[in-house]
Amino acid sequence: MMMDPRQAEALFRSMGGKTEKIKASRVIIKSQNPFALVEPEILKVTIQGQTFYIISAKKEEAEPSEEELQLIMEGANVDREKAYELFRKAGGDVAKAIMMGEE
C-alpha cells in the first residue's frame, strides 16, 4: 500500500507516535548494490520507544562501490572526486566513465 507522506504522518500521530520531518537532498543506501534516493521526503517516527524512518523519493540513482571508484581512478588516472563525477555522468557505466576520463 502506497501512502502519501502527509497521510503517514497523520496516521502515526493518531496512534500516539511522535513525528519529525528531516530535510535532505539525497539518501545513500550502502549495500551490495549501492544507490541513492534523490529529493527524498523523510519522516522520522517514534512509537513506544522504537524509531522508524519513512522515505519517499522522486528517483533512484546508482552509487559507485569502492571497487568501481578505484577502477575509474586507476583507469582514467583521476582523483576520487573526479571519478565520482565521471561515474554520475556515465550513468553508472564504469567503462564509459573511464573512457570519458581519458578524453
Image (tube, rainbow, N blue to C red):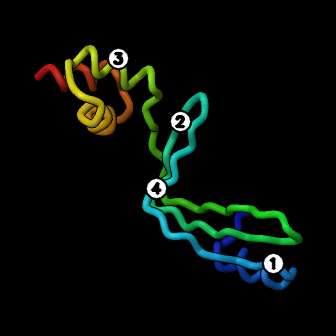
Where in the figure is residue 92, as x and y percent of width and height?
38, 32
Residue at the image position 55 percent from the left and 67 percent from the top: 41
Question: In terms of image quadrants, where is residue 29?
Answer: top right
Dot 2 falls on a residue whose secondary structure is loop
Quadrant, the N terminus: bottom right
Q: In the current view of this chain or complex, which residue is farthest to the left?
A: 103
Going from the N terminus, do you reach mark 4 or mark 1 first?
Answer: 1
Q: CA distance from mark 2 to mark 3?
A: 16 Å
Dot 1 falls on a residue whose secondary structure is loop
Going from the N terminus, do you reach mark 4 or mark 3 first?
Answer: 4
Q: Nearer the viewer, mark 1 or mark 2?
A: 1
Question: Which of the numbered marks, if any, corresponds to residue 71?
Answer: 3
At label 3, counting other C-alpha atoms closer than 10 Å, the crowd grade (few under 14, some 14-19, many 20 or more) is some
Compared across the picture, whether 67 is left or right of 87 comes to right
Question: In terms of image quadrants, where is residue 48?
Answer: bottom right
Residue located beneath label 4 in the image: 26
Say whether marks 1 and 2 touch (CB < 8 Å): no
Say whether marks 2 and 3 touch (CB < 8 Å): no
Going from the N terminus, do you reach mark 1 or mark 2 first?
Answer: 1
Kind of residue at disc 3 = Leu
At label 1, counting other C-alpha atoms closer than 10 Å, the crowd grade (few under 14, some 14-19, many 20 or more) is some
Question: Which of the numbered marks, if any, corresponds to residue 34?
Answer: 2
